[in-house]
Amino acid sequence: MKSVEKAGLLKMDFLGLRTLSVLQECVDLVKLGRGAELDLQTLAEDDARAFQLFQDAETVAIFQFESSGMRDYLKKLKPTVLEDLTAMNALYRPGPMENIPYFIDCKHGRQKVKYDHPKLESILSGTYGVFVYQEQVMAAAHELAGFSMAQADELRRAMGKKIIEEMARKRTQFIEGCGKTSKIPEKVADKIFTTMEKFASYGFNKSHSAAYALVAYQCAWLKANHPAEFMAATMSSEMGDSSRLLTLVEECRRMGIALLPPDVNRSRWKFTIEDGQIRIGLGAVRNVGQGAVDAILAARDAHGPFASLFDLAANVGPGVLNKRVVESLVAAGACDALGARERLYAGAGLALEGASAQHRERASGQASLFGDAEATPELAVAPVLPDAPVWDNRERGAREKEMLGFYFAEHPLEHLRAEIERVATHGIAKVLDLGDGAEVRVVGLVGEVRQLTTRAGKLMGIVTLEDLTGRVECTVFPEAYEQARETLKADAVVIAAGRVEVREDRGVKLLLSEIKPWEAASHQYHSVLHIEVRAEELTEERILGMDEVLSAYPGESDVVLHIVKPDHSRMAMRSRRFRVRAHDGLIAGLKERVPSCRVRWAKGGP
């Protein structure tokens, strides 16, 4: 950048924001399904549902607020106004991030706001004494040190671009200006400058942060008020990323939004809405391009729903569908209305050949063997599809995953969900948000396994692991690979421990140091069930209800009750009566008895 500028060239940054397309797509879906006209520019900025979504950190698919670290802070901040979102957007980056706990404590009255000089109060009062925006740096330079606004902007630029020589000059100018303009001692002025310098290296200007916060709020408003449409629009924008789709599918399931399979008689290219449910778009099926889908939709509009595989092939037209496309649609479940998947898959070639022969007859004007001009090609007999072995649930699921990038009917790990939460320290979706070097333990399904040979002649592996939330590529070095070779088979469930590696050129990977088979090792891990309840919620009836639920799931895990008092202080008590086991019914039961309680598993080890 600096070299370009020194050469006399102009550098411009262009930000292409996929989220704006998602918002428009969602608005279009709402209009199509509900007939409601939404104007995102005039949304009320105090929607309780939208802010509740931020407060509960249910921000999957929310622009700028989706990472696990940000979600942890949102739960503590409990944002109530757009300004809170604007500030968090600016604070959540290196440098300013260390001020987030202080910012949160000040918002909730647990900390008294402090200013290094009284003149800073008018500048920093809106952000509890914390430098959050570049405009605040400029205002401080102007008010405290007498900088002109042009000089203040030069200071902001020097700090933001890390121009060392210019910052050194500006420091001297700032300290001298503080003494002359505001009678601020040199030591205090130097401290203020250092604080500004530390922040401004990464700081946002407020207009930038506010624009981002507004887009995030619009996302949250739509997700809170039109959840199916918002998730459908988001998934349409991510059709080419199967790992991302997996995360969004899991979020739909968490929200209670039903997913409908792709269907040649009902789906369009993108994800759509049917009776409050999301219909998977044909564009999400691998090997099926836009041209083929457009032809299917045109034929469907012209001739009505397809009655058979032959009907589909014949009406779409020659040269558009090939065997690979048809087999992909069948395997994804998109042709279930036309017959049994096994027979459709086995007969894809026959249906295409029959349709091709019919088209040749039409083209030659020979409607029948004798050239009967009155005969109609539509009466041509469709080929009989061959019998084929029935696919069991495992094979159906595997083929769906291959074509869609995720398990549609039920993920093979679904029945282990509660146990996985007990054993794993992180879901894979959260692992992808962690920093370099973070230690994790995940439970996943083994996908692709590639065996490599090191320069020293030892074997190592590159393994794909998938859980209910996401997918990650893992490197297994020789020692760990040698111990785990027999365990690392496709579709095996494993417990894998290691550390996160983040590299700009290849994203996030896991470097695994230990891999254990689930069946043999899952019982070795213990955990603690933590229940957080506000003191005013603890009625006798609710305590008895919690006792009833806890006694219904006896096991090996300790239970700790955290009581949050009105002054935000806490008291924790470990139960002497109850030890429990992980089970979905346990969590659901506690939530039913005390709806506002928070329940989490703290992960232990073997």
Image (cartoon, rainbow, N blue to C red):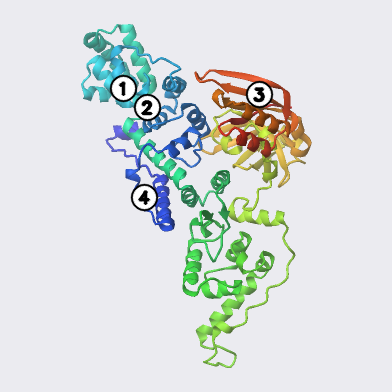
Left or right relative to 139: residue 55:
right
Circles 4, 1 touching at the beta carbon (< 8 Å)? no
Q: Residue at x 36, y 50 (%)?
A: 38
Q: Verify CB contact (< 8 Å) between mark 2 and mark 4.
A: no
Identified by mark 3, the residue type is Val
Tag 2 secondary structure: loop
Between 414 and 532, the residue placed more toward the observer is: 532
N-terminal-most mark, 1 or 2 = 1
Q: Which residue is mark 3?
A: 560
Please give the residue where the numbered disc 4 appears in the rendered image. 38
The x and y percentages for residue 580 are 72, 30
Neighbours of disc 1 within 10 Å: few (<14), some (14-19), many (20+): many
Q: Amino acid at mark 4?
A: Leu
Of the residues under marks 2 and 4, which one precedes in the sequence?
Answer: 4
- Among numbered discs 3 and 1, the one appearing first in the sequence: 1
Kind of residue sitting beneath label 2: Gly
Which mark, by number, is residue 137? 1
Alpha carbon distance from label 2 to label 4: 33 Å
How far is disc 4 from disc 3 in space, using C-alphas? 46 Å
Number of the label disc, if any, that sits on residue 203: 2
Q: Nearer the viewer, mark 4 or mark 1?
A: 4
Question: Are circles 3 and 1 on residues that touch, CB within 8 Å?
Answer: no
In primary-sequence order, the first of circles 2 and 3 is 2
Q: Nearer the viewer, residue 143 or 9?
A: 143
Q: Quadrant of the C terminus?
A: top right
